[in-house]
Every structure is written in structure tokens, then in C-alpha cells.
Image (cartoon, grey):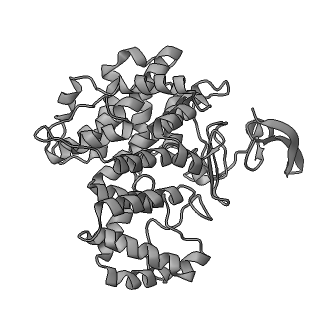
Amino acid sequence: MAETNRTASFTLDGESHELPVLSPTEGPDVVDIRKLYSQADVFTYDPGFTSTAACESAITFIDGDEGILLHRGYPIGQLAEKSHYLEVCYLLLYGELPSADQLETFETTVTRHTMIHEQMHNFFRGFRRDAHPMATMVGVVGAMSAFYHDSTDINDPWQREVASFRLIAKMPTIAAMAYKYSIGQPFVYPRNDLDYAANFLNMCFSVPSERYDVDPILARAMDRIFTLHADHEQNASTSTVRLASSSGANPFACIAAGIACLWGPAHGGANQACLEMLRQIGTVDRIPEFIDRAKDRNDPFRLMGFGHRVYKNFDPRATVMKQSADEVLELLGIEDNPTLQVAKELEKQALDDPYFADKKLFPNVDFYSGIILEAMGFPTSMFTPIFALSRTVGWISQWKEQLSDPALKIGRPRQLYTGAAQRDYVDVENR
């Protein structure tokens, strides 16, 4: 719980009001305005809630000015370098790093839940063949509540736990099936002998007619993408999951709501937008032209994948992701891929340009993750589904935390009403 050790005072119409000031373990102090309406008969106005703490959380902390991202106190760089995705899942869910026995049990449990109900295969086939994989994922994940009735009671701790495992375990299977369906290939069942990331790659790229061996460098890069996107505090999709959860909705409906929100191009589509920009540039010789356009304030063009709304200095996830991008490109080669050639040269020229350095417009995690996924062979339509897969554990952790919060109330933002004042109805013949 946050500590209260002082108050903030403000005066309205000559009357003074005192509000508690809460002190978190990290970050700025917070003025508690919960009793503001009852005391002063006024609300606050904060479009986008960018200056409002909507909840109390112990999961993830971000300091955008300093380029800090902590999961349960651990820096993201250390986790991405020394840990792996399922261990980070355990950390986010339970608050501490697991012992060797706890991690083995956790990994085994997740592995044993990777298959989906066989009747769900028919559900996939109800979509048009050219449906976007995110549309498929929203529908299928929401439909899980129709197949797994024994884990929808949010008031039962055991059912909450089972739902958590099912979502983490089955999301790679669902994402891979959405991909396979979109390209007309048969579904590939999960394999219990592979780790989480390797299993996902196998379900995406193997076919029944020939053997597919997952390269460990690609599996490690995929695992890092999962890890670096696992949670990111109270962003739009996480807030959507929390808002849906506040009504008492079942876990599958809440996560489906998060996926729908993530689909928005301003949120989860950044790495896809980055690759589309690289294709727009087309060839290496056109890079100076587009860099000049990015510097021109009168030109609407922006370099996607550079800078970040939250991180005003640098993206702490980008350093690790750049290392993975370099490893993947070295493994697969970029000589015959013009998009990746443009990406490498654009990175070099932008980093050498004082304009971008002065404005701290460094390549972010979306720039490098898009490069990696493109090199692996994923179409851009799969970038956001992979983001959703990665973020599922963060959504679940936030969902579980909220359900255990004694201060939980159904979300009900206020508004600044600017419509017509009360008026009387006029009969149609008199209008």
C-alpha cells in the first residue's frame, strides 16, 4: 500500500480543501482525489488519463525520462539477457523469481495446457480465409469462455489460476493457427518437447510433409520478443482489460477486449507501421530523402520506430532487441532482402545524424522487433498477434491483481459535458 504522509491544499470559491498525497515506492507522489467530488462538488479533467493513476499496482514501473522499465523491481535488460519468457511470466504472476523446482513445475503446467479444444478448430473455419489474424484472435479468445466453463468464475481462486495457465499456454497455439489459416496451410499441433518460443515457431513454420528444425538463435530472439513485450504498465490495452474486469467479466472476455484494443495502429501496430515505412522507402539510395522529410516540420512524414511516447531518453528494451536483430540478420543474411537492407542503413544514418541524437529519436523496440519478425518470415499481419501473445501474461497479472484489490470498483470515468442544456420536447408539427 502507498503511504500517506502529507496533504495537498487547494482553494475553490474561497473554500479550502485538503486532499491526501500518496507516496509510491518509485515515481512521483500522487494526489488522492477520490473524495474531491464529495468535498468540493467538482471533478478533474484529464483526457487520455495521462495525469491520473487509475489503480494501485505492484507489477511494473516505468520512468520514461530515465529510460527505466522494471518488472517487480527487476530491470528489463537483466531479465531479457539472463532470464527467459516463462520465468518472467512466473515473476509477473507471483511477484518473485521462482526456485528451480517452482520453475520446472510452472513450465510443465504451461506445456500441458498448450492444446486447444478440438471443436475450436471448427470455429476457425467459420472465418473468411482472408480474415486478419487479429480479427480471428479476438473472436477465438473471446469464445474460449464457451469451451472452458470450469474456469470462468472470477470469485474462485482455483478457477482464476486455471484460466491464467490456459491463456498463457494456448495463446501461441491460437496465434499460430490464425496464421496457418490465413495462408491456407494445415494446423500444426503443439509439441511438448519444445520450449515455449521454439514451439510457437514450429507451429507457425512446420508442415506435415517435411521436418522443420527450429534454429536456437531464432528461438532465443523470439523468446526475447515475448519477454520485452510481456507487460508495460497501464497502457491502453492493459487499462481496457482492467476496465472490462471491473464489471466482473470472465477472464477470456477481458483478454479478448485487450486484444481488440491492442489492434489499434496507435498501440500495437507500431512495428507493422515501421516495416511498411521501410517498404515505402524502398531502396538504400532513397534514405537521405526520407531523413530530410522527417526533419521538415511542414512534412507530415515521420520515421516510424524511432523515439517513444513514454521513453523520452531511450527505450531500455531496444538495446537487447538490437543484439537479437544483429544475430538474426547475421544468421539469415540480408543480401537479397531490400527491406532489411534499408532497415540496417537507416539505423546507421539516423544514429549518425546530430538531429536525431539531439532530439533523442533513437530506434525503439518496435523498429528492431519488426526487423526480426520480417527476417524470420512473418508477414506484417502477424506482428500484432505476436504482440498480443507476448502481452497476455501482463494482462493476466494485472487482471489477477485487480481482482484481489479491496479498493476495486467498476470503472466509471466522468465527463466534461458540453452538449445542450435541459430543454423541452417540441411536437413535430411545431418544429
Q: Quadrant of residue 276?
A: bottom left
* Image vertical order of residue 230 relative to residue 169, above or below: below
| Quadrant placement of the N terminus | top right
Residue 301 shows in this picture = no
Q: Quadrant of residue 163?
A: top left
Residue 331 shows in this picture = yes
The residue at 56%/35% (across/down) is 92
The residue at 21%/23% (across/down) is 119
* Image vertical order of residue 217 relative to residue 391, above or below: below
Q: What is the number of callouts on the image?
A: 0
* Image vertical order of residue 7 relative to residue 367, above or below: above
Residue 263 or residue 305, whichever sits in front: 305
Residue 328 image position (x, y, % from top left): 36, 58
Residue 169 image position (x, y, % from top left): 38, 30
Q: Quadrant of residue 197?
A: top left
The residue at 87%/43% (across/down) is 7
Residue 425 or residue 91, whichever sits in front: 91
Residue 132 image position (x, y, % from top left): 25, 48
* Image vertical order of residue 298 relative to residue 120, above or below: below
The residue at 20%/35% (across/down) is 188
Going by the image, does 166 lie left or right of 66?
Answer: left
Residue 319 image position (x, y, % from top left): 53, 60
Residue located farthest toward the left when viewing the structure as drawn: 209
Residue 286 or residue 10, whichever sits in front: 286
Going by the image, does 5 lie left or right of 105?
Answer: right
